[in-house]
Image: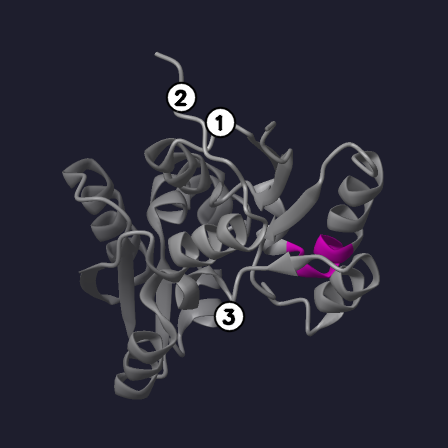
Amino acid sequence: MQPAKLLIIACGAIAREVSAVARSNGWDNVRISQIPAELHNRPEKIPAAVEQRLKDFAGEYDQVFVGFADCGTGGQLDKVLEKYQVQRLQGAHCYEFYAGSQVFAQLAEAELGTFYLTDYLARHFDQLIMQGMGLTVKPKLIPMLFGHYKKLVYMAQDESRELDHYAEAAAQSLGLEYQKIVTGYGQMAQDLQQFMQQNEAKVIKWQH
């Protein structure tokens, strides 16, 4: 019996973590296709980008899963996925599915003015936030854009001290109180495992 051919269309900001989950479970029949993480800054473009990728791979895979939350699309991504009968990760954004809905709600309740980082965002903070939002050349914009924030919470997928350093530097750049919590892969890993189970995919161990 041949395993089902499965495709995960993932945001570039979590593709590394999706790949790690696939490797740790021995899912050798899964292909991961990345969509540029820069769309984090242009969420209105995410639905069209995902739909184009679904069209590009139409008929090539037995099942497709989308590695995005709503990600600021205001429900527009779900309209695309409903048309193609494709599932996505649970939650409004990656912060929620990493931390879990309950923990994220507690964090938000404790301090509404919180800016969140994941491993990816900590690693690429300068490129995506400081440079991407023009803050490097116009630092006076920082209080204008981030003045309503009080805390930066780094949701760590691993225990890398290097990334912790980047996250601390990001908090300092924005003038925010710093907090780190270790979430691991959270609900994302559970959703991917459920997707595999639902499709009764035959797991083949990675060849070493």
Tell me which label, 2 or 3, sits earlier in the chain.
Answer: 3
Residue 136 visible in the current orientation: no
Between the residue at mark 2 and the residue at mark 1, the CA separation in whole angstroms equals 6 Å
Q: Amino acid at mark 3?
A: Gly
Q: Please give the name of the residue rendered at 26% of the width and 66% of the height, measured from the top-left corner.
A: 176
Q: Amino acid at mark 1?
A: Asp
Task: Using the image as rendered, state which of residue 119 and residue 61 is in the foreground.
Answer: 61
Question: Image quadrant of residue 162?
Answer: top left
In this view, 104 is above or below 71: below
Left or right of 122, for residue 43? right
Q: Nearer the viewer, mark 1 or mark 3?
A: 1
Residue lying furthest top in this view?
208
Task: Give, as a single range, the part of the protein colored magenta.
Answer: 42-47
Mark 3, residues whose alpha carbon is within 10 Å: few (<14), some, or many (≥20)? some
Task: Using the image as rendered, state which of residue 91 and residue 126 is in the foreground.
Answer: 91
Q: Which residue is mark 2?
A: 206
Between the residue at mark 1 and the residue at mark 3, the CA separation in whole angstroms equals 27 Å
Q: Which residue is mark 3?
A: 91
Residue 99 x %, y %: 32, 66
Left or right of 112, for residue 164? left
Tell me which label, 2 or 1, sits earlier in the chain.
Answer: 1
> Where is the C terminus found, in terms of image quarters?
top left
Magenta segment: does it hold 67?
no
Task: Using the image as rendered, state which of residue 196 and residue 120 is in the foreground.
Answer: 196
Residue lying furthest front in this view?
1
Q: Please give the name of the residue rendered at 36% of the width and 37% of the height, measured from the top-left corner.
A: 25
Q: Which residue is mark 1?
A: 28
